[in-house]
Amino acid sequence: MRLAMRGLRAGVVAVTVVSALTLTACGGGARPGGADGGGAAGGSGFSAWALTGGAEQAFRDSFTEWNNANGDTKVSSEFFANDAYKEKIRTAVGSGNAPTLIYNWSGGTLKEYVQNKKVVDLTESTKVLQNRLLPSVLASGKVDGKVYAVPNNNAQPVVLFTNKDVMSKAGLSKAPTTFDELLSAVEKLKAAGVKTPIALAGQSVWPELMWLEYLADRVGGPELFGKIKAGDASAWSDPAMLKALDMISQLVKAGAFGDRYGSVTADSGADVALIHQNQAGMLLQGAWVYGSFLTDNPDFVKAGKLGYADFPSVSGGKGDENNIVGNPANFWSISANASEAQRTAALKYLNESLFNDTYVKSLIDGGNVPVTKDAESKLAESDQKDFLTFAYGMVKDAPNFELSWDQALTSSQSQTLLTNLSKLFLGQATPQQFAAAMKAAK
């Protein structure tokens, strides 16, 4: 399961050394400490819910460190499997019983929280924390220019992975850097007998979205999807969007994804397996699958057979080749129903403990890429420094980090998006039909 990206429906890119893809079950649940004064230490502390897997250990280490140093304002925490959390937090926020710290993915959900006055403005109160964070990640926690959520774990960019051996046998010494080179690479891989040039978990659908996100950015720049987020549905039929959609159709018709991608699932790691079992040359996936490579075939990684690169550029496109898509991180917001004492304690925690040296070390030890400005020196000490440094560089150098579209849009729009995108990939809809369906989506 894609911990954060599909995790919320889909949502976190855990660049994990141990697989962050397995979400362990989590027990029942005490009454949240939000509006009802629950919290720790008789209501003078604060409460937090978070997800199992991924950066769970970093959360636990941070909460323990805080509680040891702040006996009067302790944090009470609970951890949930992804789907269970989504259901529980929806009910809790709606009833005014949310925990003090609300774990979220920003995007459409955060916008709804803000519109319904369920979370507080953190713009001025978290200045100390904000100064430690990468601007491209922090930006995802803003609504109408104000900060309502701050990142709480690791960066999650989408990466083009390669099997160096498969690529080399097809005469390809490196990953393609342009779309034209990508099409050429597909033909060379097919000529070399590779039935699946690019691994794709089409049955899961959401991995297909990564292709549209990147191509739309490369062709039309971030402003294109920016119009859609702002409510301009006509952008779905913008010439740049139609070109991006047509480029996907070109890849499908060229046999880029083989002929069985519609039955490949991501939750089972089947797309990742195609790479480390030498059956595919490339894979566009979230950085979190690095942990799957290490878990499923560590010798493949240790032997240096796994490659990783930026998404190709598009000739004449408006998008910066350093723009990235994915999930910048997961986020903390503070419940508007929390008491003043709980808010004060939670803000102190965010400014003093979130992404301090202990927190960053714990993230890196778990194979996660921190979202702080000064992480390079710490990443250099990791056993997985090559990949972690690469992924961190993608985030640090990104002029724009676009949140996964199915997170950025409303739930109903997201479902329409995935349904029609699947039709496009299966050749059951043209770019124009896709655009028409999305323009009609509410």
Image (spheres, rainbow, N blue to C red):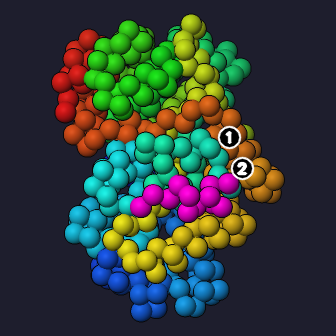
Relative placement, left or right, of 147 versus 432 is: right
Q: Tag 1: residue type?
A: Lys
Tell me where residue 176 appears, x and y as whole percent: 62, 18
Quarter in which the C terminus is drawn: top left
- Decide: few, some or many residues near mark 2? Use Cα within 10 Å; few <14, some 14-19, many ≥20: few
CA separation in Å, label 1 and label 2:
8 Å
Going from the N terminus, do you reach mark 1 or mark 2 first? 2
Q: Which residue is mark 1?
A: 396
Q: Nearer the viewer, residue 331 or 420?
A: 331
Tell me where residue 161 appears, x and y as whole percent: 59, 33
Instruction: Please determine whether, in this image, residue 303 is positioned above or below residue 317.
Output: below
Q: Is residue 437 magenta?
A: no
Residue at (58% x, 73% y) in the render: 348
Tell me where residue 345 appears, x and y as whole percent: 52, 78
Q: Are marks 1 and 2 in contact (CB under 8 Å)?
A: yes
Q: Is residue 126 magenta?
A: yes
Tell me where residue 383 appears, x and y as whole percent: 75, 55
Q: Which residue is mark 2?
A: 373
Residue at (46% x, 39% y) in the render: 403
Q: Tag 2: residue type?
A: Lys
Q: Would residue 424 be seen by someone viewing this image from the given angle?
A: no
Q: Nearer the viewer, residue 331 or 1?
A: 331
Relative placement, left or right, of 64 versus 336 is: right
For residue 338, what is the image quadrant? bottom left
Residue at (68% x, 55% y) in the render: 132
For mark 2, give the secondary structure.
loop
Q: Nearer the viewer, residue 191 or 75?
A: 75
Span highlighted in magenta in the image = 120-131
